[in-house]
Each structure stands twice: as C-alpha cells, then as structure tokens.
Amino acid sequence: MIVGYARTSSLAQVAGLEAQERDLRAAGCDKIFREQVSSVAERQQLEGTLDYVREGDSICVTKIDRLARSVGDLLAIVARLEAKKVSLRVLSISGSQALDTSTSTGRLMLAVIGAVGRPSGRLC
C-alpha cells in the first residue's frame, strides 16, 4: 500500500495542500494523511501515518521538507520506517528525480542528503 502524507505550515495554505493531495493521488496513494501545522509543532497526522503503515508499505510525500524539518529529523523518520520495513518515496527533490528508499539508488541518494545536508541541518 502507498500511503501519502501532505502538510502545509498554516491554515491559509489551502491551495498548497490541495496540490500535494492531487500529486499524491496521481502517484497512486491509497490513503492520504494531511495536516496544516508548522513543522516545529506536534505533527499528529505524521505520527498517525508512521503508526498506520505496515511491512511492505511505502510512505509518499511530494517534497522532503513536507516530511522532515531537518536532516536529523529525516534520518530519524527513515530509521523508524526501516524498522517497520516500510520505504519512503519523495516525488521531487529540488526539481530533480524522485527518491525511493526501496531501491539501492534511493538509499544512496538519502545517504548523500544526510551527508551534505544544509549546514544549519534544516531542509527548508
């Protein structure tokens, strides 16, 4: 099962949330969790997404900064997913190709992102 997660930082960003949901449906998501909350706040729907997925599932997001607030946060989320044998798909990374941790290339890309993340550690 492909499970989508969409997030905007504020309630005013309705069009952004709708665009994410459209892209996630086009990517084949069977279920989509959505929330409108800052990345530094408690993200209940993200926790719901991480709890919902099972072995063999994939979590899909449109952009990496919709999922994680920093490289450390991203790596912690991926570690949780790996423990459950769940992969991560990111549809767009800075306008380049997608990332899918179910492939060796995707795992390599994730390692590079972790190694060369912004000096501040922030993804957005």
Image (cartoon, helix red, strand yellow):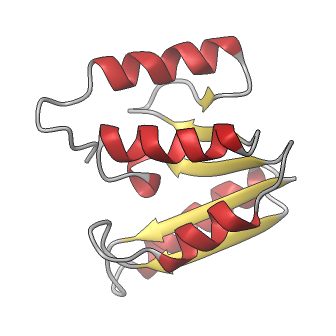
Residue 38: image location, x then y, percent = 30, 73
Is 98 drawn above or below residue 10 in the view shown? above
Q: Is residue 2 visible?
A: yes
With 121 as the anchor, is 103 left or right in this view?
A: right
Q: Give whichever of 108, 20 is nearer the camera.
A: 108
Q: Residue furthest bottom?
A: 11
Q: Nearer the viewer, residue 1 or 10?
A: 1
77 or 117: nearer the eye?
Answer: 77
Residue 93 image offset from top left, x and y in percent:
45, 33
Q: Residue at x 40, y 51 (%)?
A: 68
Residue 40 placement (x, y as % from top left): 26, 68
Residue occupying the point 67% across, 41% down: 83
> On the image, which quarter does residue 105 sit in?
top right
Query: In the figure, 70 relative to 39: above or below?
Result: above
Res 78 → quadrant: top right
In this rendering, position of residue 61 left or right of residue 14: right
Residue 88 seen anywhere in this rendered image of the structure: no
Classify residue 15 as left or right of residue 21. left
Pick out the residue farthest to the left: 120
**Can you say whether 90 is above or below 37 in the image?**
above
Residue plotted at (32% across, 80% down) = 10
Q: Residue at x 50, y 72 (%)?
A: 17
